[in-house]
Structures are given as structure tokens and as C-alpha cells.
Image: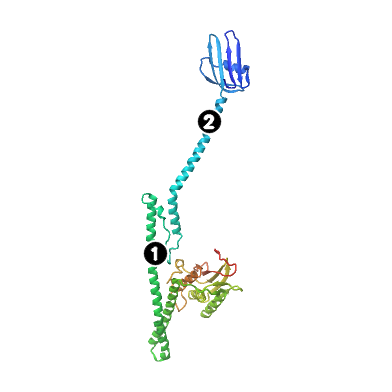
Amino acid sequence: GLPSGSISLQVTAAGSVQASVVWDYGSGPAPETQIAALLDVPRDGQVRSVRIDDLGEYRAVAVENNGTLLAAAAPLTTAHSIIDRMLWIEGLLTLAAAAVAAGVSTMVVRNSLRPLNRLAETATQVAALPLESGEVEIGVRVPDDQVDEESEVGRVGIALNSMLDHVEASLQARQASETRVRQFVADASHELRNPLAAIRGYAELTRRGRDLLPNDTIFALGRIESESQRMSRLVEQMLLLARLDAGPELATTQVDLGETVLNAVSDARAAGPSHVWRIEVPDQPMMIRGDPSQLHQIMVNLLGNARKHTPPGTTVTTSLTEQAGWARITVTDNGPGIAPELLDHIFERFTKADVARAHDAEGSTGLGLAIVAAVAKGHGGRVEVASRQAASTEAGFSRFTVWLPLVGPGVEPRDPV
């Protein structure tokens, strides 16, 4: 049957016109506008597209035989609907196929990248290990099921494991060498204590009869005594650093930092009366857990450093505050400041400031600030430095800040910065 909306037209030689439209519910006469549209169709038997008012696009054909005109037109609406439906179906199938392809591709890519991900996890774990010092053991390796000489990723895993073995062996050799050096320093420092004490004792013993000695001899004995004292201090500091490097367990005594700071500043005031000493500590106790003598050594070294490297009349301010569960100790002076090129190495051993800046006859061993850093680290803390050299337009200053974790009910140190 003809699709709904189809039009047929017959015009006889006598001029009789018969035109009808087929609908789903039957057929009926065609209006004049539709008849006129079919009459305009060329009568050569070729199928053409025409537009009929109120009905839309049609495919029409017309022929004339013995004076009789026959014409027919079928609507394109049904064809367009079928095409649109096919396009929708094709689009949905394409999307479904793309989704399936994407899922399959994702699974394939994930499976192929899984060995690489495992290599990345191994490298990330190794990168997080503290390798700069101390006993180092790299216990992370690429699993055996991920190392295969037949695949490129497997060969990378084998190379990574070999590299980790080499790095671990090198770090262990370094640690063994450092341990031997540390033990040598400790043994040497310990063995030097008694000879130095004897030298100092004999030098001091000569004081009784120095009035009978020549001036050159008196000067030489004085130099022996002062240098033996300096060497004794150096030996004691080297021995302390060796013990700190060995990492012994700290005393678990609770220490009131306020009392420690007060005592240290009192001692510094007595040792350096030419300086102005100021102190700011809270009224309530500020408790930490650690070694009292080592914590006192932190203050002695920082205050002694300020006294030795600043001129008379310099104001040295020591403050103790609490911040985010940490005790914050600052020692600030308004002296000439520290050279910028020295700041990056200030806590390294045997680092000394310019001799011209030293204002104390005792001199410096270059170990005081290294001991401060080592003791702070051993107590779970750290030390920082800030300084500006004096200039014509601005005053100089130096500020050392020590952070130590507090203890007590409800105290949980957080990053104070």
C-alpha cells in the first residue's frame, strides 16, 4: 500500500480530472493546491523532489500517454523518520561501542602500567627514607613477580633493585667509616683529658715561684696554662659531640625550661658584666623531658656565643614562650650581625666567625653552635638563626631560636611555623 499522504492524479484528454489523497483512515479528494503542484511536475517520467504547501517534501513523477496525464507523489516524512531513527540507533550503538572500547582500553592500560606503578611506589618509598646520616637500611625492593628479563619494565625493575643494593652498601660503608671516626674522636678526646689536666696542673703549680722566674718564662708558662685550658674545652666539646652522634638514650627527667634559662642568664651576667642582659620568661613552669645538663649547655653556648662575638654594651635578650605545644627559646643581640656567607654553615662543626668580631680572650672552638643543634635534635627539636649585618642605614642583630617539644596533659606539639 501507499504511505499515508500519497497523492495520485489522472487528467484525461477530455479534461476530466481525478485526484485523491491516501490517508491511514482512508482516501479523499486532493485539494487544488496539491493538484496544481502535480501539474507543474515535468512529464518525462523522472522522479523529482517537490514541495507541496502544507504537506512538505514529496517525491513526484509524471508521464503523459495518448493525451492522458498520470502523476503520483509520495511524502518523504516516513523516509525522514526512518532515517532519523536509524541515525539515533547508530549514534547510540556508536556511544555504547565507544564506552565498551574505553573500558576495555582502560583495563588494558592499567594492567600494562601496573608494573610501572609498582616501580613508582618503590621509588617513592625510597625517596622518603632519611638517607643523609645515621644507620641506613633500605628494605624496599621491587617484588620478584615484577622483575622479568623478558619485558622492558621487568628489566627496569632489575636495574632499580641493583641500584638500591649498591646505594645501601655504599651507605653502610659510609656509616661504618663515620662510626670509626666517631669512635676515634671519642677515644682520643678521652685519652687527652688526663695529659691536659696534668699540663694545666703543673702550669698552675709554677705560680708559687714565678716571682723568681724571668719575664719570658712567666709569659711562656702563662701561655701554656691558657692554651691547655682552651684545649681542655675543645676536648670536652668534641667528646660531647661524639656522645651525641652515638645517639645514646636521653635522661627522661622532666626539666623546667624557665629555671634553666634563668640560671644560664645569671651565669652569663656574671661572666659578661660589660653586656646588658635581659630576660623574659613566663611565671608558670614550662616543662619538657630531657637531659638537664645538655639543655643547660644549649643556653650556655648561645649566651656565650653572644658574649664573645659582640662588643661591650651590647644588649642580649633571652625569651621563653610557648607556641603550638612547643617551647620557643630566643637569644637576640643587637650586635654587628653575622656575615651572610656564614649563615648557611653556622651550625657546622669548626665554623668560626671572623676573628676581628671576637671580643673575648677565650676564643672560639667552632663547636658551640654545632653542640646546640645536636642537643636540640636529640631532644626532638631544632634550632634556627636569623641575622642582619649592621650598616650605615640600619642596625645589626642576630637571633637564635630553639624549638623543643613540651610535655604535659593535653600537650601535643604541632608545626609552629
**Residue at the outermost top position:** 14
Image colouring: rainbow
- Give the amino acid at mark 1: Leu
Q: Secondary structure at mark 1?
A: helix
The foreground one among 406 and 276 is 406
- Give the amino acid at mark 2: Met
The foreground one among 225 and 341 is 225
Q: Quadrant of the N terminus?
A: top right
- Residue 196, image x and y in percent? 40, 82
Badge 2, how many Cα within 10 Å: few under 14, some, many 20+?
few
Write down the quadrant of residue 130 in the picture.
Answer: bottom left
Instruction: Measure the alpha-carbon separation of dots 2 and 1.
Output: 70 Å
- Return the mark for residue 386: none
Q: Is residue 48 left or right of residue 221?
A: right
Instruction: Write down the residue under mark 1.
Output: 171
- Residue 385, image x and y in percent? 50, 68
**Residue at the outermost front position:** 145
In front: mark 2 or mark 1? 2
The foreground one among 369 and 184 is 184
Q: Is residue 227 left or right of residue 295?
A: left
Evaluate whether residue 366 shows in this view: no
- Residue 81, image x and y in percent? 56, 28
Write down the quadrant of residue 410 in the picture.
Answer: bottom right
> Residue at the location (39% across, 79% down)?
191
Q: Secondary structure at mark 2?
A: helix
- Residue 304, image x and y in percent? 49, 76
Instruction: Write down the residue under mark 2.
Output: 86
